[in-house]
Image: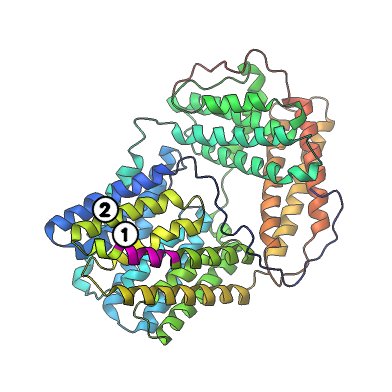
Amino acid sequence: MSSTTPTSGTSPVRRLSLTGVLRLRRPSEIWFKPALSSVAAVAPPNLLLLALGRLDLAMYTMAGSLCALYAHNRPYAARARTLAWVVLGMIGGLAVALVTASLTRDAVVLVTVGALLAAVQKALCDATRVGPPGNVVLTFISSAALFVPQSLGQIPGHLALAAAAGVWAWLVGMAPAPVRPHGPERRATAQALNAAAAYAAAHGTGADEDHAPARAAGYAAVQAAWQTLLALPTTGARAATRHALERLVVRAEVALAAPADTDPERLRAWAHALRGAGRIPRTGDAPADTDELLGVDAELAARPAPLWRRLGPLAPIAARTALGCALAGYASLALGIGRPYWALVTAAALYQANLTLTWSRAVQRVVGNLAGVLLFAAIAPLAHLGQALLVLCCLALNFGAEALITRNYWLGSVCVTPMALLVTEFAGYQATGDLMTERAVDTVVGALVGFLAAVVVTNRRAGNRVEQAVTAADRARERAARLLAEPAPAPGALESARRGLAVALTDLRATAEGAAGEWWGRALPQERVVLAERSGHRTLAEAVRRQAVRPDRGAGTRTEDVRP
């Protein structure tokens, strides 16, 4: 964080940079899981249709199969519910698209319905944090289905195919549960420990402002771990494992608040011990953690905000999606492109939390899609040798897309684009040159028109949300400070207040960064944000020194007697 206090105010227009937009990141720790799940979910239905000579029906089975891409970061009990909702949402969007396609062939109406569906899917996925891959897969299926000739009598059969494939995708997503039932929560805890260790190791090597990104990343990882653990059952055999992991997340939280008193290597050793299926590391004597876990119990008792309240702040993003997708589709129609849904889906894929991130995604989408068109030109001759090769090429590209997309969105798009083009040939081979031209034009049109719509539809609520986040952080800091002033606060009260302050500061940083990437917004209270973060983190450190930081007894390799 800067040592100088910036004044309030933002420039009306921000420079859109290309720096780092295409830079590759480290692959996700579980990159192979969605990649393998995707292939396992898509392959059997497609191969069965190939054997039956009905590969033209693959679009409907893929609607259900692609649901296997979701919820890989969630505990299995929560994953079961999430996957079920994703399958229902996919089938619901597909049903609307098929009914619309059976009632009209007016392309303008179809594009309009597709844009409205895309906006609803975007808002619901963001509000419920279903992702990755979020709304893009849902929009791709529903938009493509709008432009497939359909009759009302065919719809039940097509939806049944999607539902059957969706059930299979659900089973694929849940398949690892018997082998490693606590894998997701162990990974989330390990990521929190590693992020806290990185901040603790960097602290003291330079000015405090140099490590603000590492601190923000650490708090984000801790909050992700808490969300994972709080989704677990509170009773039964899994409760013991949950409590053991909670103690480790508390230690990561403590490290972020008091990095100077933290041994980073111990945090890394705990994180390493969580890999595999070994025993869960101990943090110390269980009685020492009583107050901390009482704070956790207080959070468990809190009810999440209702869906309608979470949807409210997303209204500008939904409006951008609806307008951008509609205009992109209309522009494609005006150019005489036969598949306007490609432009529509391109626009839908752009919209991120703010305009700056939307710009970055637009560049990544264009680069990845155009490179993918060239890859399609190289693959098409092989795929056209037979339908079996066509299916196998699609499966290979499906795996590649999920394996590479965590490195950077554009790299995954290099595989997604030829896969989508090959899927259009399941019903019959088409001219390669025409497909390449149409996809390239629709990509550019969708990205250009979609981004212009994002510029036009401003997010004027961003400044208000920053004000609210600052107020919430101040109140959380005041509550923690009041408890610190008491000689003997109630059991769990100080720990609950400290964790509430950590949550408020994490939300403040995310809200401020999101608002800073918007254009044309009113002046942001940057000075208040800086002061709230400084005072909040000081209070966090004081709370840690008062209650949470204790000398760990014994070696860091001691483990709880808890098996996964």
Assign a secondary structure to mark 2. helix
Q: Closer to the N terminus: mark 1 or mark 2?
A: 1
Cβ–Cβ under 8 Å for marks 1 and 2: yes
The residue to which callout 1 is attached is 63
Q: For the residue marked with disc 1, what is the amino acid?
A: Ala
Tell me which segment is drawn in magenta: 371-379
Q: In the picture provided, is 163 more to the left or to the right than 183?
A: left
User: Front-most of 318 and 341?
Assistant: 341
**Up-down relation of residue 282 to residue 45 (above or below):** above
Q: Is residue 403 magenta?
A: no
Q: Is residue 236 visible?
A: no
Assign a secondary structure to mark 1. helix
Q: Is residue 372 magenta?
A: yes
Q: Position of residue 550 (x, y in %)?
A: 73, 20
**Up-down relation of residue 245 to residue 359 (above or below):** above
Q: Residues within 10 Å of mark 1 (few under 14, many from 20)?
A: many
**Up-down relation of residue 335 to residue 23 (above or below):** below
Q: Position of residue 458 (x, y in %)?
A: 64, 72
Q: CA distance from mark 1 to mark 2?
A: 8 Å
Q: Main secondary structure of the magenta part?
A: helix
User: Front-most of 556 and 371?
Assistant: 371
Q: Residues within 10 Å of mark 2 (few under 14, many from 20)?
A: many
User: Front-most of 411 and 337?
Assistant: 411
Q: Position of residue 276 (x, y in %)?
A: 45, 27
Residue at (17% x, 53% y) in the render = 48
The count of marks equals 2
The residue to which callout 2 is attached is 165
